[in-house]
């Protein structure tokens, strides 16, 4: 009987699509070190984020630095991240859209950030564009990729976009107005909204690539992440996801072929899908909309007067 069970188990394993085993995801944060808010100071946020990531046994996290935020106080926060074993990368100096600055001005801005980051440990040579704006047209996009490569940078793309920044903005606004926040409902809203985004882009990858790649999740170094990222990670693991380092995620073969499209604002998977002819209307999750999120947030009764 045991041999028969083993035989059927092996057959079942080999019949499962290879992509079912992928579901790997790296955690990255933009806009570090974000200033104080009405909910918590920047130092409190950094301390909470590190504690949450360590409690969740995250092997590594990558913090994309807005270098204009760096000063003696915030430098200490970046050093806390690196001392905890996490890594830093380039998110520009002034956080102005490459679509607005133009090629030469944006390259200068990125280089200013490069110089600011040179004094820190655990810096990896990845660059991520603010707002995921890669340039105004394809010629500019490719030129910026070339200039950044000459500086030694690889593209710090994301595969999973979301509006976590707006969820955070709603929480901070409530704190500023002295309203009561139901943190259990906020946690549920944050985790499930972001998880829906993750599944959406993984399904889009299956449709456009025929597989689930090593994903890179876009989050922001904000209060919502400090409060709820450990819960999100637990939920991901409960759903069969594995948390990996960004360095491992960026070894996926989608890192090698830069999509020749002007549509990069939803991340690498959406860009690949767009280059293959999938309509733009199918490349964005419904929750990536401030009106939708405002209504859903209100319906979830996270805030009370």
Image (tube, rainbow, N blue to C red):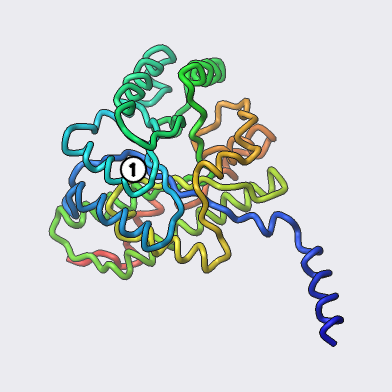
Callout 1 crowding tier (Cα within 10 Å): few <14, some 14–19, many ≥20: some
Mark 1 lies on residue: 82
User: Residue 289's x, y, as percent?
Assistant: 42, 47
Res 93 quadrant in image: top left
Q: Residue furthest left?
A: 178
Mark 1 lies on a secondary structure that is helix
User: Residue 293's x, y, as percent?
Assistant: 38, 54
The residue located at (16%, 38%) in the rendering is: 73
User: Residue 36's x, y, as percent?
Assistant: 18, 45
Residue 296 in sight: no
The residue located at (59%, 35%) in the rendering is: 271
**Of residues 50 and 182, which is closer to you in this image?**
50
Rendered view: 279 above or below 96? below
- As drawn, is 62 to the left or to the right of 186? right
- As drawn, is 80 to the left or to the right of 90? left
The C terminus appears in which quarter of the rendering? Answer: bottom left
Residue 88 in sight: yes
Res 118 quadrant in image: top left
- As drawn, is 139 to the left or to the right of 192? right
User: Residue 11's x, y, as percent?
Assistant: 83, 69
């Amino acid at each position: 009987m045991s041999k028969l069970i083993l035989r059927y188990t092996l057959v079942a394993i080999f019949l499962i699509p290879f992509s079912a085993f992928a579901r790997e995801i790296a955690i990255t944060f933009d806009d570090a070190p974000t200033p104080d808010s009405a909910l918590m100071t920047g130092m409190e946020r950094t301390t909470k984020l590190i504690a949450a990531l360590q409690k969740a046994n995250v092997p590594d996290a990558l913090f994309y630095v807005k270098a204009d935020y760096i000063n003696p106080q915030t430098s200490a926060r970046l050093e806390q991240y690196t001392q905890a074993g996490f890594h830093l990368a380039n998110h520009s100096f002034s956080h102005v859209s490459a679509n607005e600055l133009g090629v030469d001005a944006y390259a200068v801005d990125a280089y200013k950030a490069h110089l600011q980051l040179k004094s820190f440990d655990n810096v990896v040579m990845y660059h991520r564009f603010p707002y995921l704006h890669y340039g105004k047209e394809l010629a500019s996009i490719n030129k910026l990729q070339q200039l950044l490569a000459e500086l030694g940078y690889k593209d710090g793309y994301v595969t999973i976009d979301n509006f976590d920044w707006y969820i955070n903005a709603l929480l901070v606004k409530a704190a500023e107005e002295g309203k009561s926040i139901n943190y259990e409902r906020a946690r549920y809203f944050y985790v499930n909204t972001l998880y829906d985004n993750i599944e959406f882009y993984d399904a889009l990858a299956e449709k456009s690539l025929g597989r689930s790649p090593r994903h890179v999740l876009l989050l922001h170094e904000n209060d919502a992440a400090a409060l709820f990222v450990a819960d999100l990670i637990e939920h991901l693991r409960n759903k069969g996801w594995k948390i990996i380092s960004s360095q491992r995620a960026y070894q996926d073969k989608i890192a090698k072929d830069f999509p020749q499209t002007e549509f990069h604002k939803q991340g690498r998977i959406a860009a690949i899908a767009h280059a293959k002819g999938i309509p733009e209307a199918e490349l964005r999750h419904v929750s990536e909309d401030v009106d939708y999120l405002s209504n859903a947030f209100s319906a979830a009764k996270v805030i009370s007067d």
